Image (cartoon, rainbow, N blue to C red):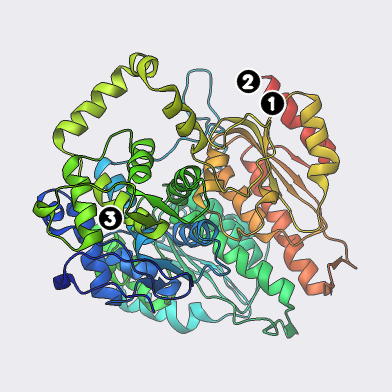
Amino acid sequence: MAAAVPAPNNGATAAAASRDPAASLTTWQPNRSVTRRSARIAREVYSAWYGRVGTSSYIPSEKVQQLFNDMQLYPSKSQVYEMLQCAKECANRSSAAYLTFGEFCIFATELKRCYERGIPRPIQLSRLLERDGEDKKRRNRRVSKGIPKYEVFLGGSCNPTTWRHDIAIPMLKRLGITYYNPQVSHWGPELIELEHQAKQNAAVLFFVIDNQTRSVASIIEAAHMSGRHRKLILVIHAYEGPGQKIWGESISPEEFEDLTTGQMVLQDLVERQGIPVFESIPIALNCTAKVLRENISVQELGLKDYAQPVKMAHVQLGDKLIKLREAFDALDTTNSGELCLADVCMAFRILTNRNLSLADVRSIVAAQTGMPGNEVKDLPLEQLHVNFEQFCAIVAEFKSCESEARKLWQLVLAKTTRLVQAIVSPLTKVLEWAISPRPLRSLQLGAPPNCQSNCVRDVYLGGSCRASTWREDIAIPMLKKSGLTYFNPQLCSWSKRLIPIEAAAMDNTYVLLFVISNTSRSLASMAVAAHYIGLGCNVVLCVQQLLDDCILGSDKLSKQAVKDYNRGRMYLSDLANREGVPVFESVSESVECVIQKCNSR
C-alpha cells in the first residue's frame, strides 16, 4: 500500500506512487528550507491540507470548497466543478469524486497568485457600445412619482409556496424592514405596473427559487437581475430527486436533470458577479438586514455572516492542470508515467519560462533520497524519477519561489516582447505552442483547425442542446458560407454547469445567439440568455413555444408543465423586447440577423 501524506513534522519525503488511482497516493512534499525562505504559498497549502484531511493524499469533492476556504480562497461552485472534471480527465480517472494533493497544490497556488495580482474581470466583446464608446443606454420605463419605495422586493417562487407568509414577512417585520409581496390572493392586470415599480425602486431584490414549483420565470428573472448588477439576495432549494411531485405530478429523471441544471447554472451566473448564494431563508434575511443597515454590497458578505463568499469566479483554473499534463506527456516519450529529473527541469522551463536553480534541484533530490539538502553533492538527474502527481506538487512549490528580482525581470520581459521572441529557442517556442491553454483536450471548438481556444470568435451558438440539430442543420452551414467563426458549446459532453472555460468563450465572442427550441425545456439556456441581456451584450434570440401535446425524449409533458415552460419563454421574449434585443421564431431568420450584425461591425 502506498504511503500517505506525512504529518508536517515528519519531514519531506517522496516515494513511488500507487498504480491504483483510487488508492492513497504518495506525493511530493514541500521542502522545509525552501518553504521557510520563500515558498509561502506552498507552505499554506500543505498546512491547510493537513489540517483538513490529515494524512490522506486525496480529498473528496464535497470537502474541496471548505479546504479552499481554510486558505482564505473562495472559488465558485463552477470553478470547483471545473477543477474536478479537468483533474479527472488529466488522470484518466473514471470519477470526478476527489482531488489529489498535487492537483490541489496547482489549483490553490494559481488561485492565490490571482488574488495577489488582482486579475481583472474580463470585458465581454459583445457588450453593446455607442459610437462614442459609452455603454448602450437601456430602455427603462420611467419610475412614476408617488409610488412607495420598499426596501425589499420578495421575488421568486409563488403559488403554492408559502415561504413569504411563513418565514420572510414575519422576520422582516421584526427587523423593521419594509417589503413588497407580489404574491396576492386576487391578482389583476393593474398590479403589473405596481409590481414593476416596486421592483425598480427596491434596495434589495430577495429571490427564493423553491423546489415546490418549476420556477421557470423566476430563474430567468433572477439571472437577468444579476446581470443588471442589482443588489440580489438569492436562495436556492435543490430538488429532492426524480419522482418528486410538482403540482401533484411526479417529475421524471430527465425533467429532474433539466430543473437541477437550471438551478446550478443560475447559481453559476450569480456567483460570477461575486454574489453568494444561500440555502437558508432566515440566514439570507439576516444578511439582507446587514446589507441595508450597513449600506454594503452583497459581495461584501462573508463566512462570519454564514454566507459562502465568492471571489474571482471568472478565473479559469482547470486549464492550468491541463497545461501541466500536456507538458508532462510531451516529455514522457516512453509513456511510462514518470519523468526523470532532467525532463522535470525541461518541463518546468516550458511552463514557467525559467530554470530550476541548483538549490531547487538539490531540494528535489534530497526529498527523493531522504538526504539533507546540504549533503547532496551529485545530481543524478537521469536516475531519479517522479510521477505526474509529484510533478504537480514540485511545480506548485517552486513556481511560488519567485523573488522580487524575478518579478521585476518579468516586467522587463513584458515590455520587450519582440526582442525576447527573437532570441527564444525555436524548440521552446514549439513546446510552448504544444501546451497552450485549451478548454479540454477532448473538447472540439467548432472553429477552424488553426484557431486556439482563447481566440476571438464571431458567434456563440448558445441555446437548446439535447435532441436538437439546429446548429448542424442550419446555423453552422450559414455561418461557414459567410466566413464567420463560431463556438459550439454543445460539443462539451460533461459540463452541466457554466464553467469558466465556457464563459470565457462567450466573453471572447462578438454576437451571442440563443436558440430556445421547441424540442427541449431549455431552462438553463433561457437563464444564460437573460443574464447576458442584463449585462448589455449583443444578443439575438430565437424563441419557439412548446406545443400542447409536446413529447421531449421519453416524457410527454403535462398541460401544467407546458404552461410553466412557455411562461418562461414569454417572459424572456418580453424582457428582450424591453431591452431592444431582436427576437425571432425562425432559426434561419435569427442566424441571418446574426450575420448582419457581424458584417456591420
Q: What is the CA distance from the residue labelled 2 to the residue labelled 3?
A: 39 Å
Per the image, the residue denoted by label 2 is: 601
Whether residue 21 can be seen here: yes
Q: Disc 2 vs disc 1: Cβ atoms closer than 8 Å? A: yes
Q: Nearer the viewer, mark 2 or mark 3?
A: 2
Residue farthest along the right direction in this orientation: 549
The type of residue carrying mark 2 is: Arg
Mark 2 vs mark 3: which is more N-terminal? 3
Residue 404 percent location from the top left of the image: 15, 35
The residue depicted at 47 percent of the width and 69 percent of the height is 19
Residue 77 percent location from the top left of the image: 45, 62
Whether residue 41 can be seen here: no
Residue 478 percent location from the top left of the image: 81, 31
Circle 3 packing at 10 Å, graded few (<14), some (14-19), many (20+), is few
Specify the label residue 296 is tagged with.
Answer: 3
Q: Quadrant of residue 151?
A: bottom left
Could you say which is closer to the camera, residue 371 or residue 563? Answer: 371
Could you say which is closer to the camera, residue 590 or residue 116? Answer: 116
Q: What is the CA distance from the residue labelled 3 to the residue labelled 1?
A: 39 Å
Specify the label residue 597 is tagged with.
Answer: 1
Is residue 422 rendered to the left or right of residue 144? Answer: left
The residue depicted at 78 percent of the width and 29 percent of the height is 480
**Secondary element at tag 2:** loop
Could you say which is closer to the camera, residue 182 or residue 259? Answer: 259
**Secondary element at tag 1:** helix
Q: What is the CA distance from the residue labelled 2 to the residue labelled 1?
A: 6 Å
